């Protein structure tokens, strides 16, 4: 009788805390982190300790990622409701007694100054994952409506500050969870079509709509300037569009 001894897969020779990682996802992370380091070296090495600080922050982030990657998902999901509730309460506190800087009220002093909207980047997907896990096997349209409501509450509070960038990140993190929970394409396609048509109209009309003095009503002036600069950075090549042009 011939005995065949199978060699262990190369992943089995890795440390236990590495085996659970998706290889392609880890590769994408390493590639993006390396590009970030290279960019910071290129633009910031001659300016004090910015490159070193960026490398230190990246190392801390990797350490946190490795620690949390060892926590089973069913343990992480229980953090969703309390983190979400804490985040919403802190956002309400910001609206009432928050610190204002440069026309925005985004910070809260609790002994140390914090920005509660950053907490929602983690709490929002955890909360929605917890909600859909509880509804697994009995999903209805109402469940998705409740999820959208859970997403809308912190989103409205963050937009009120105003903080368009963070609100878009929180919105994206929530929508991705809703999509992966099984949202049907017939509910996804219409908003995407409307958004695409809106972008096309905005690009076409930008020469008129981006003129000085034009009020977009739904956006503040600095937000309008950001959108217009993104569409055409050469409108202000030595000011708002400088960094975009330098990155081309």
Image (cartoon, grey):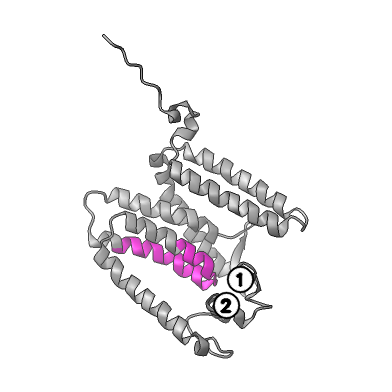
Residue name at image x 41 percent, y 79 percent: 200
- The front one of 39 and 77 is 39
Indicate whether 6 appears above or below 73.
above
What is the magenta range? 145-170
Indicate whether 5 appears above or below 78.
above
Residue 154 image-quadrant placement = bottom left
Circle 1: element type: helix
Please state, as top left, top right, bottom left or bottom right, where the N terminus lies in the image: top left
Q: Residue furthest top?
A: 1
The residue where tag 2 is placed is 229
Q: With 211 as the anchor, is 185 left or right in this view?
A: left
The residue where tag 1 is placed is 244
From the top left corner, tell me how far across and down residue 208 is, in percent.
51, 90
From the top left corner, tell me how far across and down residue 167 is, in percent.
49, 66
Q: Is residue 147 magenta?
A: yes
Q: Is residue 44 magenta?
A: no
- The front one of 177 and 192 is 192
Q: With 142 as the anchor, is 153 left or right in this view?
A: right
Residue 228 image-quadrant placement = bottom right
Circle 2: element type: helix
Indicate whether 32 appears above or below 1.
below
Residue 241 image-quadrant placement = bottom right
Q: Residue furthest front?
A: 2
């Amino acid at each position: 009788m011939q005995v065949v001894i199978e060699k262990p897969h190369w992943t089995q020779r890795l440390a236990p805390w590495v085996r659970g990682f998706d290889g392609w996802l880890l590769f994408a992370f390493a590639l993006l982190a390396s590009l970030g380091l290279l960019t910071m070296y290129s633009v910031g090495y001659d300016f004090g300790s910015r490159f070193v600080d960026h490398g230190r922050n990246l190392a801390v982030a990797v350490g946190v990622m490795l620690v949390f990657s060892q926590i089973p998902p069913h343990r992480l999901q229980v953090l969703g409701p309390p983190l979400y509730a804490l985040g919403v309460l802190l956002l309400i506190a910001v609206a009432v007694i928050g610190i204002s800087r440069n026309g925005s009220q985004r910070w809260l002093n609790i002994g140390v100054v914090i920005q509660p909207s950053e907490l929602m980047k983690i709490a929002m997907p955890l909360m929605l994952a917890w909600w859909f896990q509880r509804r697994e096997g009995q999903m209805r349209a109402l469940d998705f409506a409740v999820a959208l409501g859970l997403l809308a509450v912190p989103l409205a509070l963050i937009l009120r500050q105003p903080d368009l960038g963070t609100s878009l990140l929180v919105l994206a993190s929530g929508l991705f969870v809703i999509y992966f929970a099984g949202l049907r394409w017939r509910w996804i396609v219409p908003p995407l079509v409307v958004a695409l048509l809106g972008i096309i109209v905005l690009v076409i009309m930008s020469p008129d709509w981006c003129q000085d003095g034009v009020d977009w009503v739904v956006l503040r002036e600095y937000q309008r300037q950001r959108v217009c600069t993104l569409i055409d950075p050469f409108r202000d090549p030595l000011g708002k569009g400088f960094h975009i042009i330098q990155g081309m």
